[in-house]
Image: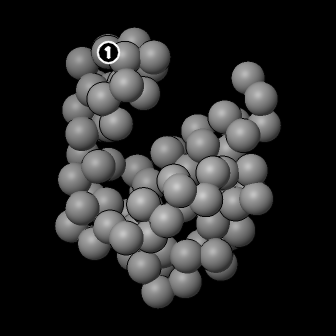
Amino acid sequence: MNSGHDEIAKLGAAISKQDFRDSFLSDPDGTLEQHGVDKAQIPQELLDTIRSLSSEQLAALASVKETLQNHNVPPHITAQMV
């Protein structure tokens, strides 16, 4: 996996955490750094999309991901869904 994919995976894991979602809306860059995500390795379009989401939308994204994982959906399928 290349470093860009690693950072996207870290971002996905971070979105699952309530504290990330709570602080991301007010301080996206600081929150990414605090959670060990190198934003320079993430496509700008993806960052812009995540930044455009509301708190409720981020929570829904995390919920979909968690539900897929709880049902043992393989990671490559989960990645296509989320």
> In this rendering, does residue 36 appear at all?
no
Residue in the picture at 24% in, 61% down: 57
Residue in the picture at 32% in, 15% down: 73
The spot of residue 71 in percent (x, y) is: 24, 18
Number of callouts: 1
The spot of residue 58 in percent (x, y) is: 31, 60
Against 76, is 45 above or below? Answer: below
Q: SS class of the residue under badge 1? A: loop
Quadrant for residue 15, please give it. bottom left
Against 31, is 3 above or below? Answer: above
Quadrant for residue 8, please give it. top right
Residue nearest the observer in this picture, 16 or 61:
61
Residue in the picture at 42% in, 27% down: 79
Residue reaching furthest to the front = 45
Q: Which of the colour schemes (rainbow, by chain, secondary structure, one colour) is used?
A: one colour
Query: In the visual, does 23 lie left or right of 41?
Result: left
Residue nearest the observer in this picture, 80 or 21:
80
Residue reaching furthest to the bottom = 26
Against 31, is 46 above or below? Answer: above
Point out the image quarter for the N terminus. Answer: top right
Residue for badge 1? 73
> In this rendering, does residue 75 appear at all?
yes
Mark 1 is on which residue type? Val
Point out the image quarter for the C terminus. Answer: top left
